């Protein structure tokens, strides 16, 4: 299912991210791209307070960023997005802790997930591991001698 996300609301709930960081949006988008790639989903993320010359970023790895210029708000933009979705809204998950946004999402039958709950899921979802690494044993004297002989041949040196 695709996500509609209140970006700054989510940043405030993720350890290691801060609204004071000038790169907070880019860092969140990177995390969301990895998440969406693992989950096979997509997301549209709304951010408040864009400068007038800030362009919306094109979609990458299933994540689209929308920067909302004042006096508009990300909350209002998410509500408008839900309205545009019409009958497709039940196919979306809205991530916000704003009561008015959650109420509008429920009214349109979209799923709602609080920013806290989504942040927890985002942090607990990790890329599949390759399994435990095989422990290395140090090479023995015979193996070292074989490697030394091989390297000497490659450099033109005569083996012992």
Image (tube, rainbow, N blue to C red):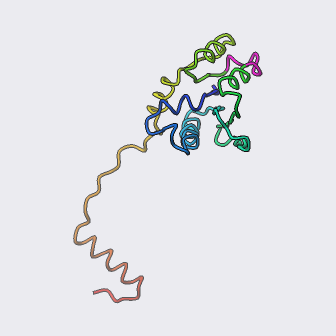
What are the residue bounds of the magenta stretch? 83-91
Residue nearer the viewer, 31 or 39: 31
Q: Residue at x 58, y 40 (%)?
A: 25
In the image as oriented, which residue stretches furthest toward the top? 107
In the image as oriented, which residue stretches furthest toward the left? 141
Whole-percent x and y of residue 121?
48, 28
Q: Quadrant of the C terminus?
A: bottom left
Whole-percent x and y of residue 111?
61, 17
User: Is most of the magenta stretch helix, strand or loop?
Assistant: helix
Q: Residue at x 27, y 72 (%)?
A: 144
Q: Residue at x 62, y 12 (%)?
A: 103
Instruction: Work out whether 144 lies above or below 153.
Output: above
Instruction: Please give the count of numbered marks on the rendered protein.
Output: 0
Quarter of the view holding residue 68: top right
Whole-percent x and y of residue 72?
71, 28
Instruction: Work out whether 113 lies above or below 70.
Output: above
In the image as oriented, which residue stretches furthest toward the front? 71
Instruction: Work out whether 94 lies above or below 143.
Output: above
Q: Quadrant of the N terminus?
A: top right
Residue nearer the viewer, 126 or 60: 60
Residue nearer the viewer, 114 or 72: 72
Instruction: Work out whether 136 lies above or below 90.
Output: below
Whether residue 85 is in magenta: the answer is yes
Q: Residue at x 75, y 18 (%)?
A: 83
Whole-percent x and y of residue 81?
72, 24
Residue nearer the viewer, 117 or 100: 100
């Amino acid at each position: 299912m695709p996500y509609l996300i209140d970006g700054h609301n989510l940043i405030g709930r993720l350890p290691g991210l801060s609204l004071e960081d000038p790169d907070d949006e880019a860092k969140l988008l990177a995390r969301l791209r990895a998440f969406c790639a693992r989950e096979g989903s997509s997301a549209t993320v709304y951010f408040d307070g864009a400068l007038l010359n800030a362009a919306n970023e094109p979609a990458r790895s299933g994540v689209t960023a929308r920067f909302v210029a004042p006096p508009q708000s990300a909350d209002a933009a998410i509500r408008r997005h839900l309205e545009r979705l019409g009958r497709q809204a039940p196919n979306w998950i809205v991530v916000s802790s704003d009561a008015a946004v959650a109420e509008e999402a429920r009214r349109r039958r979209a799923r709602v997930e609080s920013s806290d709950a989504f942040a927890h899921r985002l942090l607990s979802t990790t890329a599949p591991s390759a399994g435990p690494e095989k422990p290395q044993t140090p090479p023995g004297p015979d193996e070292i001698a074989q490697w030394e002989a091989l390297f000497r041949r490659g450099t033109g040196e005569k083996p012992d």
